[in-house]
Amino acid sequence: MLSRKAESSEGILIRAFRRAARSAFLWPEQAADLAASGRPLTELHGVGPFIAEQLRAWIEKPPFDEMKPPPLRRDFLTRADARAILVKNPEWSERLRGDLQMHTQWSDGSASILEMAQAAKERGYEYIAITDHSKGLKIAGGIDEKALARQALEIAEANAAMRQHGVTVLRSIEMNLNPRGEGDMDRKSLARLDFVLGGFHSALRTKEDQTERYLAALRNPDVQILGHPRGRVYNYRIGLKADWTRVFAEAARLDKAVEIDSYPDRQDLNLSLLKVARKAGVRISLGTDSHHAHQLDFIELGLAAALKARIPADRIVNFMDLAALKLWVRKLRRRPA
Ligand SMILES: [Zn+2]
């Protein structure tokens, strides 16, 4: 509703509503619940008196005919939604061992590797994977093979410091894939990583069916996890089209994983595709795509989506302990292409 209001507003109100819409993803409670308990809506981040008044009007008299979001904004959870889903099944969140996508100062993130590891420790994680961008994605400060080798030293230092806390920092990369599913890094340097997350960052607005692109990416022997598969972004880009039944069936056949990128305005895979993924029996990896240490919180969105889609626990990569995770990757690397 806030996004829609931004579209019909003028002047500074456009930004005010747009900003409130983005903040609304992370409100810890539903605005309606807050209002019902008599608390001021201005407690919510990004809500001043003016926005609060608008929210109150919607709560009092919901404009039902305007409430269905357009495709660009459909099938996104808010943090409040996620918490409502997760609270009904606390064992689900307790199974989580770690987070498999995050960025650091090595590419476009704001924290050091050690800071990310410390945040992981606070969350009780067993492991995290550092997935800075690869060299082809210059706009995001992508790193080359030499930088990746230097990063290994910093990861080793972080691991030495974190060992007493039981947190392991895994070496990975978000490797940029071209539309033919090919990566941009030397295979030998990829083989030294704990696993490789592949992701598309180009030609994401094409309207044609992209099934072949996905099949090629999954068959790329260097890639174990396909990150943010659709490439959608809230209110900005709808994402790619494909025959998802075929894509997930191939991922399942190859025993590779597809990701739920839990960044609020990505949420990619989304709920409706996760239901297709469940039927294929494909492995699901959860990553926050964090660019700041506090963003590790976003994992709630991915956990809730997987739970709501009824993905079996044994299909979630991050529910494996470290030894099982490593064994899975080792087996994939030994498989003939
Ligand atoms: Zn990416």
Image (cartoon, grey):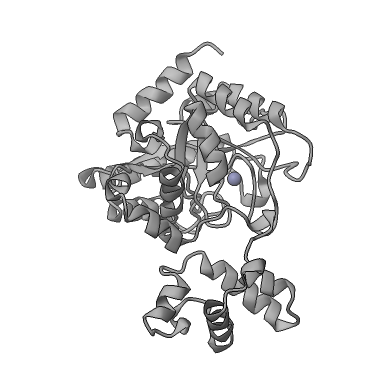
244 or 240, nearer to the observer: 244
- On the rendered image, what quadrant is the N terminus found in? bottom right
Tell me if 93 is positioned left or right of 195 in this view: left
Tell me if 160 is positioned left or right of 325 in this view: left
Residue 184 location (% of width, % of height): 65, 32
* Residue 197 visible in the shown view: no
Residue 187 location (% of width, % of height): 57, 24
Tell me if 99 is positioned left or right of 253 in this view: left
113 or 319, nearer to the observer: 319
Of all residues shown, which one is farthest toward the top? Answer: 336
Tell me if 207 is positioned left or right of 12 in this view: right
Work out whether 293 lies above or below 53.
above
| Residue at the image position 63 percent from the left and 76 percent from the top | 17
Residue 308 location (% of width, % of height): 44, 46
Displayed quadrant of residue 81: bottom left
* Residue 141 visible in the shown view: yes
53 or 300, nearer to the observer: 53
Of all residues shown, which one is farthest toward the bottom? Answer: 49
Residue 97 location (% of width, % of height): 32, 42
- On the rendered image, what quadrant is the C terminus found in? top right
Work out whether 10 lies above or below 242.
below
Work out whether 65 lies above or below 223.
below
144 or 261, nearer to the observer: 261
| Residue at the image position 72 percent from the left and 43 percent from the top | 204
Of all residues shown, which one is farthest toward the left? Answer: 164
